[in-house]
Amino acid sequence: MNKEDIVFMSACDMIEAIKSQELTSIEIVETIIERIEEINPKINAYCTPTYELARNAAEKADKTTKRGGEVPPLNGIPISIKDLMQVEGIRTTFGCKAFENNISQKDELAVSRLKNAGAVILGKTNTPAFGHVAITDNLIFGPTLNPWNLERTSGGSSGGAGAAIAAGISPLALGSDGGGSIRIPASINGIYGFKPNFGRVPIYPK
């Protein structure tokens, strides 16, 4: 299996490849990190990569696989997190200059659930300030470009997430959507985006 096959493999196929030990999570993560290093400078989808966090989580996932028995549903699967969402110990800027150096003290509930499901966090993806517009650009990181055409927008506000998936640098991505913020980038970048009903996924722990 070549590297391009791996980075464009669906999450479902990755789950089966890890379960069967055809691939390890660390192999997948290292392949995607290599591609992030190549592609991200061109499109600016990731604003805060978390490579060591990803490597540590991937190694843990591989140990879980080797033990056998039941494993978490997303065991070893890489995912990116929109920079509106808190990840403990990682910078969360909300795309706003005032929060440029803000370090999250705890996980967003959705992030906590993803971790418990075995997902491997690759990093934070770019967003406009507070997700308020349908393009992805801000004063900290600048614009996220469309991987199909670098003269076009990736949409917004989950534009970093949409561009990352389309470019093969994030098999899954956690975004948010109140008025099209997942659906617009999905359409513009030619990928699938899913918006659950309001309240289905709590936005912050009480």
Image (spheres, rainbow, N blue to C red):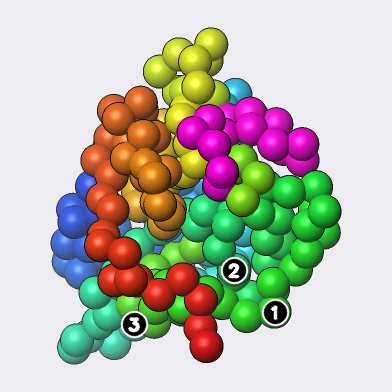
Does the magenta run of residues contain 136? yes
Against 101, is 65 above or below?
Answer: below
Where's the N terminus, which quadrant?
top left
Earlier sequence position, callout 1 versus callout 3: 3
Residue linked to disc 3: 64
Q: Position of residue 113 (x, y in %)?
A: 39, 78
The residue tagged with tag 2: helix, strand or loop?
A: loop
Q: Amino acid at mark 1?
A: Gln
Identify which residue is drawn at 39% across, 51% down: 177
The stretch of residues the image draws in magenta is 131-144
Q: Are marks 1 and 2 in contact (CB under 8 Å)?
A: yes
Which numbered disc covers residue 105? Answer: 1
The residue tagged with tag 3: helix, strand or loop?
A: helix
Identify which residue is drawn at 47% across, 54% down: 80
Res. 128 image quadrant: top right
Identify which residue is drawn at 32% across, 40% down: 183
- How packed is label 2: few (under 14 Cα within 10 Å), some, or many (20 or more)? many
Cα separation between marks 1 and 3: 27 Å
Q: Nearer the viewer, residue 12 or 174?
A: 174
Q: Position of residue 194 (x, y in %)?
A: 26, 50
